[in-house]
Amino acid sequence: MLFVTAILSMAAFTSCKNSKKEPKDYIDISSYLKGQLRYIDSVPFAFLKVVEKDSVYTDSQFISKEQVKNIAGQFLVEELEKKNFEQNFQETSFADATIHTITITYEATNKQSPVSRVDVYVNPEKEQISQLYLIRSSEQGDSSVTQQMLWKHNKSFVLITSVTKKDMPERTITERVIWDDREDN
């Protein structure tokens, strides 16, 4: 009987030891954004920045590649680095027939994470990312700041920053940076 117990214990230990978790193979969001910033360096386009405050158009101007990279660089945070991302986000996905896209959603498992959600829209025919949507939140002094960014592959991005202070109306600034407004093929 002792021999059988020892064999079963060894088998259980061995099976636990050999049951490794399947490695995650999430899309590398940080590398994608870095690649898009390298793409910006390589294109001969002008960069138009359009700003709205509380849904009222306030300004438009052409900006340099460095200014574009400074604005977009706000989203190159350590939470999106591949190793951190795979450890701290949960992935779900579905095929959306109405927009002919596969949507992959990553939700932060830690509710205190500054980046709470990332949606990746993949064009299945081209097998590439068509859009990327991020939500990032932080507390800055007496204000709550929420940023949403929608990045259109090789074309533009929109950054919406909402600031909420106690006993004051929410203030929203929308910055659009456009470098290629041609229709997709």
Image (cartoon, helix red, strand yellow):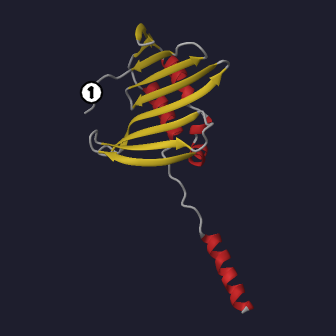
Q: Residue furthest front?
A: 167
Tally the marks: 1
The quadrant in which the N terminus is found is: bottom right
Indicate the position of residue 162 as horizontal and vertical percent values.
52, 20
Residue 184, quarter of the rendered image? top left
Q: Residue furthest bottom?
A: 1
Indicate the position of residue 40 as horizontal and vertical percent values.
45, 26
Residue shown at 28%/24% (left/top)?
182
Q: Residue furthest right?
A: 2
Q: Is residue 150 above or below residue 89?
A: above
Query: Identity of the amino acid at label 1?
Result: Glu
Of residues 86 and 96, the one drawn nearer to the viewer in this rendering = 96
Residue 138, quarter of the rendered image? top right
Residue shown at 56%/31% (left/top)?
76
Disc 1 is placed on an element classified as loop
The quadrant in which the C terminus is found is: top left
Of residues 26 and 16, the one drawn nearer to the viewer in this rendering = 16
Mark 1 surroundings within 10 Å by alpha-carbon count, few (fewer than 14), some (14 through 19), many (20 or more): few
Residue 100 is left or right of residue 54, and the answer is: left
Q: Is residue 166 above or below residue 107?
A: above
Q: Residue furthest top?
A: 58
Residue shown at 52%/42% (left/top)?
107
Indicate the position of residue 71 as horizontal and vertical percent values.
52, 21
Q: Which residue is mark 1?
A: 183
Residue 144 is left or right of residue 97, and the answer is: right
Indicate the position of residue 167 as horizontal and vertical percent values.
59, 14
